[in-house]
Image: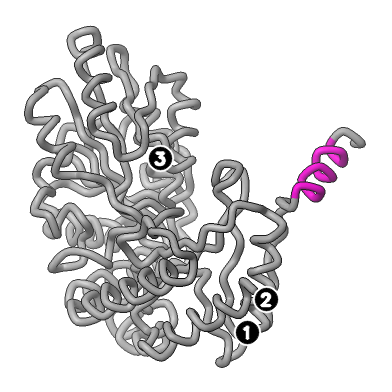
């Protein structure tokens, strides 16, 4: 047991010992720790009457995996909604982590090489590890480096699967999806896999994500969306071709061997997706306050900020100082947590601000003033 203690002691000395946070709740505290980008989670009480009216008998437990459950109605209704929205079959998973680990490991058949952005989410990395897949990583958002890998391995493998996130969760920057699509068109053996975890709800005319906003949904072979962020629910989904949909049903272990989400979660997701579709004004407001926040942080730090979304990082570069700044911010009435290794590399320690559509311009001004005070 002492060996485990020594490891934890090292974490503590380096300022990166993690603990489950417990914060005082209160209306005066601006909470920027959540991924509730469209503010639906904070407004859930507004929709309860509609939810009960539409789904009066929905169950709180599935009690079985999807392949064994007898009541599939609400899952099927949610998947139909997503299928109609994206124009391709959708498959529901229990979480974004389940969706990525299950999909990556299932699609890793002989003759496959994965080409992943270096900042891809841990769930993709774990899926690759679980599958024992062959993988090459390309420098973050560097399509020239990716092209060199494609040219090197094209023809050596039956398929190259390029995988990226539409919006990256730590820097808030966005993938060059148009350039990736152009590369895919040039090399027919290339498939494109996009994780829209932080794009869903925030971008696109109907809130379907960055790929919708750029008119590229039809070009994406595998698209993953999560329901626990802007959708204010739980679970995730994969949108893909009819063939790959059926392949995942038969081979994605996280789908096959997990007890399904409670039907109530699926019903709530359906309701939230319907509301998200009509929140164009909220999406515009979120874009405006995100730009205000980004420009304010740039003015405070004197450095350009990578964000192009509602995720705005304040780069600190030291774990202990990041923790201290976070504590000072909380005393100022702003809740924003430090991000440290291994989530980000050493030297990349930061405070991560997740904005949401419920914030006013005055709120953002208060946040920026609090940052100035906390960094003294």
Q: Which residue lies at the image location 36% right of the left edge and 89% below the top edge?
A: 46
Say if 66 sits above or below 280 in the image: above
Q: Residue 210, labelled with which disc?
A: none
Is the N terminus in the top left, top right, bottom left or bottom right quadrant?
Answer: top right
Residue holding disc 1: 332
Residue at image mark 3 = 120
Residue 327 against residue 210 in the figure, above or below: below
Q: Which scheme is used to colour this image of the protein? A: one colour
Q: Is residue 59 visible?
A: no
Label 3 or label 1, whichever lies nearer to me, is 1
- The span from disc 3 to disc 1 (Cα, nearest Å) is 33 Å
Pointer 2 or 3: first along the chain? 3
> SS for tag 2?
helix
The residue at which mark 2 appears reads as 328
Q: Quadrant of residue 157?
A: top left
The residue stretch that appears in magenta: 4-14
How far apart marks 2 and 3 lie (CA) works out to 31 Å
Characterize the local packing of mark 3: few (<14), some (14-19) or many (20 or more) Cα atoms within 10 angstroms: some
The image shows residue 276 at horizontal and vertical percentages of 24, 73
For the C terminus, the image quarter is: bottom right
Does the CB distance between marks 1 and 2 fall below 8 Å? yes
- Check disc 3 and report its element: helix, strand or loop: loop
């Amino acid at each position: 047991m002492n060996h485990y203690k020594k490891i934890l002691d090292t974490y503590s000395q380096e300022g990166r010992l993690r603990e489950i946070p417990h914060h005082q709740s209160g209306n005066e505290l601006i909470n920027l720790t959540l991924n509730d980008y469209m503010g639906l989670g904070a407004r859930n009480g507004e929709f309860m009457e509609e939810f009960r009216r539409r789904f009066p008998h929905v169950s709180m437990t599935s009690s079985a995996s999807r392949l064994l459950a007898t009541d599939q109605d609400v899952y099927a209704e949610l998947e139909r909604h997503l299928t109609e929205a994206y124009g391709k079959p959708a498959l529901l998973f229990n979480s974004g982590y389940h969706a990525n680990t299950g999909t990556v490991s299932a699609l890793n058949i002989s003759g496959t090489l994965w080409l992943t952005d270096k900042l891809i989410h841990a769930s993709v990395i774990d899926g690759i590890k679980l599958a024992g897949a062959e993988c090459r990583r390309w420098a973050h958002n560097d399509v020239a480096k990716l092209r060199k890998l494609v040219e090197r391995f094209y023809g050596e493998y039956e398929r190259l699967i390029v995988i990226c996130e539409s919006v990256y969760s730590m820097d808030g920057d966005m993938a060059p999806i148009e350039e990736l699509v152009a590369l895919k068109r040039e090399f027919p053996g290339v498939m494109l896999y996009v994780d829209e975890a932080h794009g869903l709800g925030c971008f696109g005319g109907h809130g379907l994500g960055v790929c919708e906003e750029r008119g590229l949904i039809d070009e994406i072979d595998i698209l993953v969306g999560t329901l626990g962020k802007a959708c204010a629910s739980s679970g995730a989904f994969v949108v893909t071709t009819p063939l790959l949909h059926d392949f995942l049903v038969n081979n994605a272990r996280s789908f096959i061997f997990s007890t399904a989400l409670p039907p109530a979660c699926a019903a709530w997701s359906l309701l939230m997706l319907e509301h998200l579709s009509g929140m164009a004004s909220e999406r515009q407001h979120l874009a405006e306050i995100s730009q205000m926040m980004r420009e304010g942080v740039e003015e405070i730090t004197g450095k350009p900020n990578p964000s192009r979304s509602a995720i705005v990082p304040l780069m600190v570069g030291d774990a202990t100082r990041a923790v201290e700044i976070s504590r000072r911010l909380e005393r100022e009435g702003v809740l924003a947590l430090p991000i440290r290794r291994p989530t980000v590399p050493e030297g990349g320690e930061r405070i991560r601000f997740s904005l949401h559509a419920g914030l006013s311009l005055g709120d953002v001004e208060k946040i920026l003033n609090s940052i100035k005070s906390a960094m003294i």
